[in-house]
Image (tube, grey):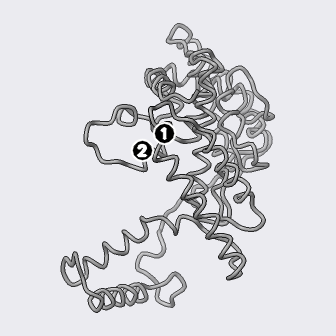
Amino acid sequence: MISWKYIEMLYERDSKFPIRMVPKLTRRHIAMLPFANLSVKLAVQILSHSVAAGITTMVHYGDLPPEAMTTSHFVEEFDKLFNCFNSSSRNGKAPMSHAISSSTEHVIFLREKLRWLDSIKPLNKSGTLPCIHGWKLTIACLLDLWDDLSNNYNVSFLITNRLNQDCLENMFSVVRGKGGHRINPDCREFRSALTQIMVDAILVPGKGSNCQADLDTFLFNLDNITAKGATHAIRTRLHQDVPRLIQPIVQNCASAYVLEVVEKDVVAYISGYVAKKLTGVVCELCKADLIQESHVTDSSFFLSVKQYRHLQEGGLTMPSPALQHCLQTAEIAF
């Protein structure tokens, strides 16, 4: 059974930790004020891959019952649906976040989701939900639109975020601001305002223009302080000295606060981010100390759940136990 209470339990448990699995999840998401404006942003943050991974991790460590996995699957599938209807490029790392084309799996996925939505039975008197009907109608419209564009107009791909209402709202707001606050322009006024907007856009200097912008060159940038690389002897000495230098810090923190297993999982996820950022600026010897082979350990379950399965490269980085221990020590100390 899919239940909202598991998302509430995730928030109540996760919000108690200094470092969190789902930091974007706030009290506003769980308990909206009466008569508050509806926000798609809040819905997307709740029905997200991070929330699904958080529920799965909590189930793994026994903080949530196994029945919560149904809710985790529901959240994960809706995250893919949101990605499918908000693609902004031909390539994307998140599932279904790339443009629709004949070579992608979007059509199969959307047809499967139509059957999946039909199988959902709300536990209310009517047995239906307007949002479920709305999603089915939206999916059917997108399938029909892609079929028409690809077969009749030779469109090779479709970026779906251009179909959202936000684009029209942004354009209409600019039209209203032209020549005064026109909340109800006639056809002539609208055409005139739209023409002026298009001309204004043309007059903006492009990136390939002949004129150079002021302050195009800075006297100092990060490239000036890029490390030129140390000799092998220096690298070896640093490699040997670092454990000795940080040992006093570890000893001073030995009697400090002990991280819970869920917190260690979050630290492992953060350690992977740190390792990925450092691998481009350190030597091969240091890189070997930062990264380990991608396999699940006792403190990296959350990281493995957050990883997108379909990515062959460019995904999350599995940090070494030494780096995890270093960041765990820093978290305890500070």
Q: Identify which residue is drawn at 47% across, 47% down.
A: 131
Q: Residues within 10 Å of mark 1 (few under 14, many from 20)?
A: many
Q: Is residue 170 left or right of residue 128?
A: left
Q: Amino acid at mark 1?
A: Ile
Q: Is residue 64 left or right of residue 9?
A: right
x and y percentages locating residue 254 in the rendered image: 56, 10
Q: Identify which residue is drawn at 70% across, 43% down.
A: 308
Q: Amino acid at mark 2?
A: Leu
Q: Identify which residue is drawn at 67% across, 66% down.
A: 90
Q: Which picture quadrant has residue 75?
A: top right
Q: Is residue 234 visible?
A: no
Distance (Cα) linking label 1 and label 2: 6 Å
Q: Identify which residue is drawn at 64% across, 50% down.
A: 114
Report the label total.
Answer: 2
Q: Is residue 138 visible?
A: yes
- The residue wearing badge 2 is 42
SS under mark 1? helix
SS under mark 2? helix
| In front of the other: 262 or 190 | 190
x and y percentages locating residue 19 in the rendered image: 49, 27
| In front of the other: 212 or 268 | 268
Q: Which picture quadrant has residue 198?
A: bottom left
- The residue wearing badge 1 is 46
Q: Residues within 10 Å of mark 2 (few under 14, many from 20)?
A: some
Q: Which picture quadrant has residue 145?
A: bottom right
x and y percentages locating residue 71 in the rendered image: 58, 31
Asked whether the residues under the numbered discs 1 and 2 touch, taking CB atoms below 8 Å apart as contact, a structural biologist would say yes
